[in-house]
Amino acid sequence: MNITGKIKAILCDENHIENSIVRNFLALPGKEHFRFHDELDLASQIGELKQKGFKSKEVLILKHFSGRLFQKCPGSPNVICCNYYILNTGFNCLFDCAYCFLNSYLNTYGIIHFINFEDALKEMQGRISGNKDHLHRIGTGEFTDSLMYDEITGTAEIIINFAHNHHNAIIEFKTKSDNVDHLIGLPHKNIVVAWTLNTERIIGLYEKGTARLENRIAAARKVQDAGFLTAFHFDPIVMYDNFLNEYFSLIDTLFHAIEADRVAWISLGCFRHSPGFKEIISETHPYEKLTLEEMFPGSDGKYRYMKRRRIEIYRALSEKIRCYSEKPFVYMCMESSDVWKSVFNVDFNSSDDLESAFNRHLKEYFYI
């Protein structure tokens, strides 16, 4: 799956033209190159590209990032989160998923990739070295796709080699691509390659540009055969006519193709959105039907399906997964403590409770 063909223009900081990531991208054929010398100049050049008709996902911006390169997942207030940490490699994604929270969370132009990656590693080093008895779960796929052009950046290999020497860090690369061939043969200790999965219907309607479901599953089998653990995220789970049977079929298809006992975790999350999302998506995807279902504001301010319905969905899907294996840690993303009690009969009063259970499970089943 070659998605770099979507990039038509590359904007890079002229002060860092010798950076290895910059050089690798500039070597791609058929791209227009532009340089900027500061943020004001960058804004001016972006304005010119817009006037020339370049769309946001056609422009790659290579720049230093002065903000937090390593941070705790922002999560949502008043819900249980897993205390995941994010290694920021960039903002925005080449894929065009209608439901993506980035559509309303980020108001930026272009696909931004950070080139000061050594600073990110220093921040991560400080976190995991400061608490060597704690298992730190870290991922790069929160504000972008982890692997969409990773064979060009080499980011995953650098992180993998870093993690190989740190027993208390487990790294997740989350993707909707099938771009894994460059990972084969790399060390796989404490590394999890993960896919967001959905039904064929939802992928076709709302995940423009992503790898087909069968290709994602084939890629998962490929990395398992190479020694990596895998993980899967059924998020967002979208309600529509006969949706539950289609999600059951998806789970059957997945576990008939891969080794269930090589799956470290599976997350479940029903479709949810922030206020204002409906207005944004009505402009970018005028024929969408995601927001037609009746939804209500939750304790975190996001709109969700009725709690009773969500509980039924989570119970049904988790039971279906358990038909194949007890090894994956199955958890819900951003749900309240009472939903956790109703679905799994556990008392999680804080995110720390979920994190502790998560890490105990990984240590018990996967000797991490």
Image: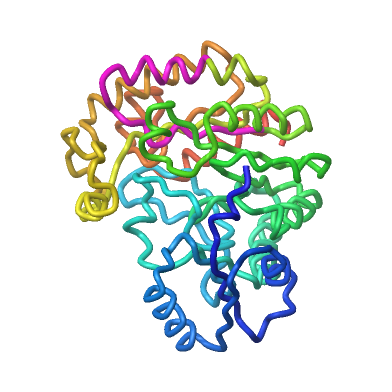
**Compared to 239, does 180 lie above or below?**
below
Q: Quadrant of residue 364?
A: top right
Residue 138 seen by the camera: no
Residue at 68 percent of width and 63 percent of height: 29
Q: Position of residue 175 (x, y in %)?
A: 56, 43
Q: Which residues lie in the magenta part?
A: 230-252
Residue 56 seen by the camera: yes
Which colour assignment does the render follow? rainbow
The mark tally for this picture is 0
Magenta highlight on residue 353: no
Magenta highlight on residue 243: yes
Residue toward you, 90 or 9: 9
Residue at 52 percent of width and 29 percent of height: 213
Side of 147 where 321 appears, left or right: left
- Residue lying furthest top in this view? 323
Q: Position of residue 34 (x, y in %)?
A: 57, 79
**Compared to 154, does 292 lie above or below?**
above
Residue at 32 percent of width and 57 percent of height: 104
Q: Quadrant of the N terminus?
A: top right
**Compared to 190, does 112 lie above or below?**
below
Side of 227 where 17 appears, left or right: left
Q: Quadrant of residue 22?
A: bottom right
Residue toward you, 17 or 342: 17
Q: Position of residue 59 (x, y in %)?
A: 50, 66
Q: Quadrant of the C terminus?
A: top right
Q: Position of residue 269 (x, y in %)?
A: 39, 35
Residue at 60 percent of width and 67 percent of height: 31
Side of 169 where 241 appears, left or right: left
